[in-house]
Image (spheres, rainbow, N blue to C red):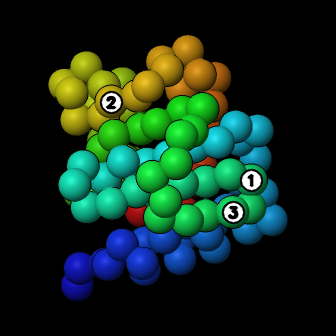
Amino acid sequence: MTTTLEELTQRVAAAVGEDAGLGKTFKVDLRGEGFIHIDGASVTNEDKPADLTVSISRKDLKALGAGELNPMTAVITGRLKVSDMGLAMSLQPQMQALFAKLG
């Protein structure tokens, strides 16, 4: 069963809860399928500027969340692109926890 962008956004919002715990704005670019923008507890599909943007396919996002795709391997192979590697590295535990809830 394919998850729509709206369903995925609702799952992200449920996973975020009261606060994403990132301390920064975060945007997932689903490579042509839309965007998920996280700012604290606010989760939207707006293509707004963010402190960190991650570009990844929906299939790879699911694999990342399920632990089937290593984040560093994904970056090295171009399956995952980040706008700020230093910030991504500092937020990796929080992002991995969020992605795990989506897997």
| Residues packed near mark 3 inside 10 Å, few (<14), some (14 to 19) or many (20 plus) | some
Q: Which mark is residue 1?
A: none
Picture residue at 33% right of the left edge, 60% below the top: 34
Residue type at tag 3: Ser
Relative side of 45 to 18, left or right: left
Q: Which mark is residue 40?
A: 1
- Residue ID at (68%, 51%): 39
Q: Amino acid at mark 1?
A: Gly
- Residue 79 in view of the camera: yes
Answer left or right for 19 relative to 78.
right
**Position of 36 relative to 25 (above/below):** below
Which comes before the other along the chain, label 2 or label 3?
3
State which quarter of the image contains the C terminus.
Answer: bottom left
- Viewer-nearest residue: 2 or 41: 41
Q: Secondary structure at mark 2?
A: strand
> Which is closer to the viewer, label 2 or label 3?
3
Instruction: Inspect this view and state whether residue 70 appears.
Output: no
**How far apart, in angstroms, are the residues tagged by discs 2 and 3?**
23 Å
Residue indicated by mark 3: 42
- Residue 8 lies, in percent from the top left, at 43, 72
Q: Position of residue 74 (x, y in %)?
A: 28, 31
Nearest the camera: 35 or 16?
Answer: 35
Q: Relative to 52, is 35 on the left or the right?
A: left
* Mark positioned earlier in the residue sequence (2 or 1): 1
User: Which residue is denoted by mark 2 in the rendering?
Assistant: 81
Alpha carbon separation for disc pair 3 and 1: 6 Å
Cα separation between marks 2 and 1: 22 Å
Is 5 above or below relative to 33? below
Q: Are circles 3 and 1 on residues that touch, CB within 8 Å?
A: yes
Structural crowding at the residue carrying mark 1, measured as other residues with C-alpha within 10 Å and reported as few (<14), some (14–19) or many (≥20): some
> Residue sitting at 61 percent across and 54 percent down?
38
Please tell me whether mark 3 sits on a helix, a strand or a loop. Answer: strand
